[in-house]
Image (cartoon, rainbow, N blue to C red):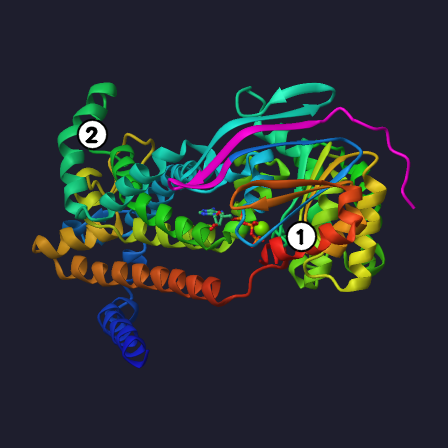
Amino acid sequence: MVISCASVLAILGFLAYFALPIFAGGHLGEIFSWEWRPFQGQCGILPMAVGSFLLAVTAMGLAYPLGLGICGFAHGLGPRWLRRPLLGLIHFLTSIPTVIYGFVSVIFLVPLVRGIFPESTGYSWLTAALTLSLMVLPTIVLLIQAQLQQVDGRVRLASAALGFSPAQTFLWVLGPQASRGLWAAAVLGFSRALGDTIIALMVAGNAPQVPHSLLDSIRTLTAHIALVVATDSTSQAYQSIFASGLILFMVTTAINLTLRRLQSGTRPAASHD
Amino acid sequence: MEAKRPVDLEPSVRVEHLHVSFGGREVLHDLSAQFAPGEITVILGRSGSGKSTFLRALNRLNECFPGSATRGSVRLKLQGQWRDIYREALPLTELRRRVGMVMQTPHLLPVSIAANLALPLKLVLGLPRREIPARVAGALKEAHLWEEVADRLDAPAHTLSGGQQQRLCLARVLALEPEILLVDEPTASLDFRASLKVEELLLSLKERYTIIAVSHSLSQARRLADAALIFRDGSVAERLSREDLQAPDTLQALLEEIF
Ligand SMILES: Nc1ncnc2c1ncn2[C@@H]1O[C@H](COP(=O)(O)OP(=O)(O)OP(=O)(O)O)[C@@H](O)[C@H]1O
Ligand SMILES: [Mg+2]
């Protein structure tokens, strides 16, 4: 506990120290602007912040309903024999390194998107969102699943004996019971999507712009940091990555705190067991 | 005391050659029995003799447990029509709504007292919202629970005492107006006075339902039963009439048999 607090504070201090010249040197307006042309001294990171946000939201928008559906399927909506293989597949997905998702996406999904939408290069917001949604899917499923499994077996039996259909049991009885798991899955899934670097870097195209359509290329804050660090750049560009890091760090910390509160908070009266 | 009953009632439940097993271990062996409407049949038998499993075979609830397998035929007269529940495509939800069951231990929904009754009324019967409160109150009164919970209908159901929970489960089933009522040790966690109340209730209900009740109390069986089945190792060892139950020498034999 003490160590984790100390390391969090150390990282915050480190980022703040390096980001400080931005605030002190009056470059704030330049960093928080919409243009990224480092050789003309324009180092705005707002397009990347927007890109990060949009990508995380769309990936979650795809993965969350799918994850919920999979959990429902495993808990009575689907045939019982399918439950094990389905959850086994999800477990398998967690063990795949992220870079493999990106790699497979470059080989299959990018050409596919390019084939369907010839005006796009295939390296796009859409491609990244699809890939990323697959990557966060196991997180979502396993969190909701863990909560559903805590629900007393007698509750299921009671619902069945009363004549509830499996769908009714899931929607009206199990779902409300798992509400904390549902929230935790949303929060943690979002934070994983936001924190992902590799997939965005590999398939989102990395153009520092605010996208106009799903087929446009985007750059996330995480990919931005990786790109700037990897390619020797101007000092102001370098400063911009500390600001990026600071934003990411603050957002993920906020998410973590929310999660803590969710986990320690008492359940609402309606979902007692 | 003995009320007049029509003799030789046409049965409403016919069970023939029923076998139930869990994970390959047979629990009920070649069990056959009949139950008549307007009567209470009490099932007696040692712990583990398959009484609960038998009740669950009548609403196909054993299927909720992994590794269960059922053979044989169970035919029920529902809405004047014979249904072979393991052969016909009678939807499970429909079957379970018509064959109400109160389980051995209270199986509550994790919601409020009122919602435990209201949710099934809404989902299973599709009752319009405005009709629900009256129905809930009616069922709670019928189960002698109303006075105790009227001022805290919105409290979580698990805050009730064990005996109150049991009566809540009974009320919940009555609210759904089934045709066949399965009650598994309905007075297991009730004191004597409360037990008598529930027995009174069951007696008053028997006109409307076919009631099959599991009991572990011989004196209760004598108060309730129009007929009794003695279970031994997963089949019916003996069937007793009301008169048999009252006779002192059968009583002695039974006591040695069961307990
Ligand atoms: N879900 C299940 N899985 C495996 N075995 C089961 C299951 N339910 C019951 N059994 C077994 O079936 C046998 C009969 O159980 P059952 O609950 O029907 O007995 P019972 O007569 O109701 O006993 P009691 O009076 O203790 O309630 C027992 O040996 C029990 O272990
Ligand atoms: Mg039992």
Residue named by callout 1: B254
Placement of B7 over or under A15, stated as above or below:
above
Q: In this view, does B53 lie to the left or right of A216?
A: right
Q: Is residue A225 left or right of residue B197?
A: left
Q: Is residue A233 visible to us here?
A: no
Q: Is residue B71 left or right of residue B162?
A: left
Find the distance from the CA under tag 1 to the CA under tag 2.
Answer: 75 Å
Q: Name the outermost residue toward the left.
A: A232
Which of the two residues, B226 or B203, is positioned nearer the viewer here? B226
Q: How busy is the neighbourhood of tag 1: few (under 14 within 10 Å), some, or many (20 plus)?
A: some
Give the label on residue A109, or none. Answer: 2
Q: Name the outermost residue toward the front.
A: B249
Marks 1 and 2: which is nearer the front?
A: 1
Q: Does the magenta stretch include residue B123?
A: no
Q: How busy is the neighbourhood of tag 2: few (under 14 within 10 Å), some, or many (20 plus)?
A: many
Confirm whether circles 1 and 2 share one chain: no
| Quadrant location, the N terminus of chain A | bottom left
Q: In terms of secondary structure, where does tag 2 sit?
A: helix
Residue B193 x, y percent position in the rendering = 82, 62
Q: State the residue at coordinates (32%, 58%).
A: A29
Placement of A79 over or under A224, stated as above or below:
above
Q: State the residue at coordinates (51%, 27%).
A: B72
- Residue interval drawn in magenta: B1-29
Q: State the residue at coordinates (46%, 53%).
A: A183
Residue A119 x, y percent position in the rendering = 23, 22
Residue A9 x, y percent position in the rendering = 30, 76
Q: State the residue at coordinates (44%, 39%).
A: B21
